[in-house]
Image (cartoon, rainbow, N blue to C red):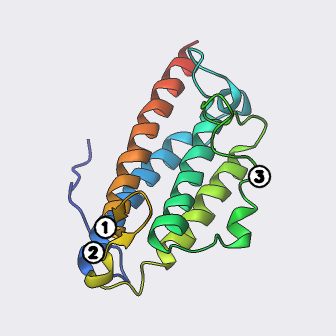
Amino acid sequence: MERRALQVSTLPGYEEEIGRWLWCLEDVRRTLITELTGVSQSILDTKSDERQTIGSLLYHIALIEADWLYEEVLVTEWDSEIRLLFPLECRSEDGALTHMEGQTLEEHFYRLNKVREVFLSHFRSMDLTDWRKPRVLEQYDVTPEWVVYHLIEHESHHRGRIFQSLSKLRND
């Protein structure tokens, strides 16, 4: 087995501390994309144990990332190009994640990559003062630092659910 170095790096082009957090965010995505590459349409669209489809979870991951960027970090209207990537709301009327079926892996990857590209672009010029500056919203105050922490946690959680579904679907 090849010996590996397990360490956090800094994404180039960012303030060092911010770049380390963003590297962690990217690392979660990298493992998700790697594991999903080559997955069939059937696996993307099949519910495992009456849970959401993998496609539904991928849509949700991208939508939540965009939402936190525009609503909490930037506190602004969504970019129209990004808004077009999300024709469906996050949840159905009963509170369940929106069911997504029929979109190809390439469409899901495009959405995830486009949102991440825009997300990362907004952090390039951010300094530590802005990184830790609370955005004062109606229900809470939140810093960009906490948003990135939350998105790492959020995507990691759903990545685990996706990997469980993949394992089950591949073995069925």
Query: Residue 105: where, in percent of width, then height?
Result: 68, 45
> Mark 2 — residue?
132
**Amino acid type, mark 2:** Arg
Q: Residue furthest front?
A: 138
Nearer to the camera, 46 or 90: 90
Q: Is 76 on the left or on the right of 143, as rendered?
A: right
The answer to whether residue 10 of the structure is visible from this angle is no
Q: Earlier in the sequence, mark 1 or mark 2?
A: 2
Number of numbered discs on residues:
3
Q: Secondary structure at mark 1?
A: helix
In this rendering, the answer to whether 135 lies above or below 86 is below
> Mark 1 — residue?
145
Query: Residue 25: where, in percent of width, then height?
Result: 38, 59
Q: Earlier in the sequence, mark 3 or mark 1?
A: 3
Q: Earlier in the sequence, mark 3 or mark 2?
A: 3
Q: Is 100 on the left or on the right of 51, as rendered?
A: right
Query: Residue 106: where, in percent of width, then height?
Result: 70, 51
Could you tell me which residue is drawn at 36 percent across and 80 percent down? 12
Could you tell me which residue is drawn at 77 percent across and 52 percent down? 87
Could you tell me which residue is drawn at 46 percent across and 66 percent down? 72
Quick one: label 2, few (<14), some, or many (20+) residues within 10 Å? few
Quick one: label 1, few (<14), some, or many (20+) residues within 10 Å? some
Rendered-image quadrant of the C terminus:
top right
**Decide: marks 1, 2 in contact (CB < 8 A)?**
yes
The answer to whether residue 26 of the structure is visible from this angle is yes
Instruction: Residue 27: name its quadrant.
Output: bottom left
In this rendering, the answer to whether 18 lies above or below 125 is above
In this rendering, the answer to whether 35 lies above or below 116 is above
The alpha-carbon separation of the residues under discs 3 and 2 comes to: 32 Å
**Amino acid type, mark 3:** Pro
Could you tell me which residue is drawn at 27 percent across and 69 percent down? 20
Q: Using the image, tell me which numbered label, if any, was put on residue 87.
A: 3
